[in-house]
Image (cartoon, grey):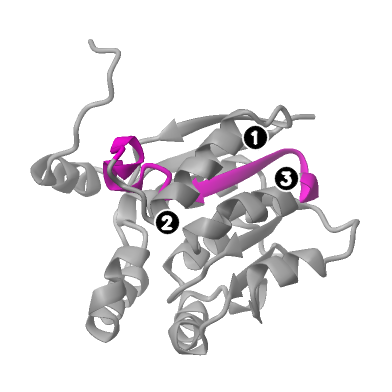
Amino acid sequence: MTRATETISPELHEYLVAHSAPVDDVLADLAAETERLFPERIGMQIGPEQGTFMTLLTRLAGARDAVEIGTFTGYSSICLARGLPSDGTLLACDISEEWTSVARRYWERAGVADKVTLKLAPALETLRMLPTERRFDMAFIDADKEGYVDYWDELVPRMRPNGVLLVDNTLSNGRVIDPTEISSPVEGIRDFNDRAVADERVELVVLPIGDGLTLARKKE
């Protein structure tokens, strides 16, 4: 027994993935095509175990309406959409037609295209233009790190009671605890982490999944 989280070596990660629900051909092909088309951006795509976790969590939460900030080529949006019921909705926010053109093809192939509405515009503008009565059951933030605090501040009031927020990359490859790291993305993550943990509207935990995944629940 231990009170600390196990360090995940490459070999242990391989074992972890092998003993989780298998990734289907759609997601496997999407990951491979993303690596081929955007090799320098592959780190922007979530891993298979995180995708499975997000699908399971969406189902467990009974989510119907979801929003995603940062879509890239669509891996995470497929995982979220698969967790929604047949009449569920996912608002996907991104600014890249090039990246999301790949996502559109794979949404069709995954059979979730009818659940997804894509907004190609700065996500903060999209959120601020939503009707005041719009409420979400599930939210996922995985975009520019400098914008995390602003996205959070727009999303938390738009979550239903017990709504779930997931925020990616909140450990920033361990750089959050390195005082010599002063890049704007790392500072953005630090600012967000400090803001979120002090937010009395939610309760949360930072999970060592992928590059750090913050899981928060909107209080009733």
Label 2 SS: helix
Magenta stretch contains residue 170: yes
Q: Earlier in the sequence, mark 2 or mark 1?
A: 2
Q: Disc 2 or disc 1, which is closer to the eye? A: 2
Label 3 SS: helix
> Which residue was labeled with disc 3?
156
The stretch in magenta equals 157-179
Where in the figure is residue 98, as x and y percent of width and height? 45, 89
Residue name at image x 12 percent, y 46 percent: 10
Rate crowding at label 3 as few (under 14), some (14 to 19) or many (20 or more) other CA atoms within 10 Å: many
Q: What number is the disc on residue 142?
A: none
Q: Is residue 10 left or right of residue 47?
A: left
Where in the figure is residue 122, as x and y percent of width and height? 64, 74
Q: Earlier in the sequence, mark 1 or mark 3?
A: 3
Residue name at image x 42 percent, y 68 percent: 75
Q: CA separation, marks 1 and 3?
A: 9 Å
Q: Identify the image quadrant of the C terminus.
A: top right
Q: Identify the image quadrant of the N terminus.
A: top left
The quarter of the picture where residue 198 lies is top right
Q: Amino acid at mark 3?
A: Val
Marks 1 & 3, CB-CB < 8 Å contact: no
> Which residue was labeled with disc 2?
185
Q: Amino acid at mark 2?
A: Pro
Q: Residue furthest left?
A: 11
The quarter of the picture where residue 85 lies is bottom right
Where in the figure is residue 192, as x and y percent of width and height? 54, 43
Q: How many marks?
A: 3
> Which residue was labeled with disc 1?
217
Above-or-below relation of 159 to 83: above
